[in-house]
Amino acid sequence: MAPRSQPTARQVRLGTELRKLRVSAGMSAREVVGILSSTSAQMSQVEAGLSGVSEERLRRLAALYGCGDEALIEALVEMATDRTRGWWEEYRDVLPPEFLDLAELENHARFIQVIATAHVPGLLQTEEYARAVFGYWVPPLPDSELELWVAYRMRRQQLLSRDSAVPYEAVLHESVLRTRVADRRVARAQLDELVRQSERPSVSVRVIPFEVDGFAGASSSLVYAGGRVPMLDTVQRDTPYGSAFLDAAAQLHDMRTLFRKVEEASLDPIRSRDFIHRLSKEL
């Protein structure tokens, strides 16, 4: 089977975790392929996410590496054997790959925590808000492409309304609520939508008011997605050149600490809902 030309972030993550296990076991790739009667090229492709790995081979690798974490092994097996074609695959070769990677990450997450200091998070945006954000793109998107991007974002939001909705917690700075990406009408509708979404049992929206002392986290925006086991958590952060997916243990620890710090500066969900409602009435 030919190597994948564009592996997804999830496929790359599986290969990364297998490489971590090998390195932790103190084994070289050459040693492993000798034992498994494989080739260095095949091993390299698997660890780069360019080739898949069967359940049988994955379990053999885990045993060879001395991995006794059954929960981790089962999670990796799930990643390796899941052949479900997600709805986002309909957009492959049409939208940027990082868009699809984020939707796949959200779909498999056990929980999602978001810090927003610039825009309302994508899963909570109204259609008109999303259209205004994408409409600010440089260079400008053609109208047909703009509508495709907006439709894709709206479809992502089904995650919050499905029967087994993932627990979702968003912490928003007041600047996010007051910034008018379009006009007063769109701003009011977006605030009302935040109030509506915050009433879902699985959704928590918290606000950091301007008046809070000691908040220096203006650059703290992130999406933290919980994996099947904590070791497989992932953080997504926007950069000037696209999305970055972070998964190193030290990075995950730092991002968990950051989320706790930002959360501690916010109002509780009920006071936050009242806060957003008051802002909407002021418009």
Image (cartoon, rainbow, N blue to C red):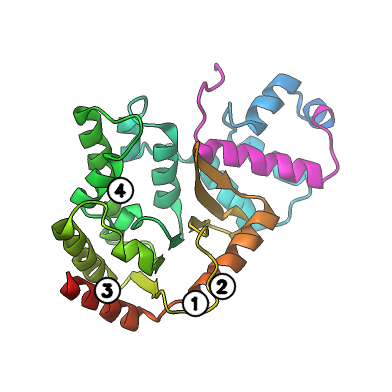
Asked whether the residues under the numbered discs 1 and 2 touch, taking CB atoms below 8 Å apart as contact, a structural biologist would say yes
Identify the secondary structure beneath mark 4: helix
Q: Using the image, determine if residue 271 lies above or below residue 243.
A: below
Q: Earlier in the sequence, mark 2 or mark 4?
A: 4
Rounded to the nearest angstrom, the CA distance separating label 2 from label 3 is 21 Å
**What residue lies at 79% left-to-right and 49% top-to-bottom?**
66
- Near mark 4 (Cα within 10 A), the count class, few <14, some 14-19 or many ≥20, is many
Q: Amino acid at mark 4?
A: Arg
Stretch of the chain drawn in magenta? 1-30
Quarter holding residue 42: top right
Residue 11 visible in this rendered orientation of the protein = yes
| Disc number placed over residue 261 in the picture, else none | 2
Q: Amino acid at mark 1?
A: Ala
For disc 3, the marked residue is: 276
Prevalent SS, magenta region:
helix
Rounded to the nearest angstrom, the CA distance separating label 4 from label 3 is 23 Å
Rounded to the nearest angstrom, the CA distance separating label 3 from label 1 is 16 Å
Quarter holding residue 170: bottom left
Identify the secondary structure beneath mark 1: loop
**What residue lies at 68% left-to-right and 41% top-to-bottom?**
18
For disc 4, the marked residue is: 156
- Of the residues tagged 1 and 4, which is closer to the observer? 1
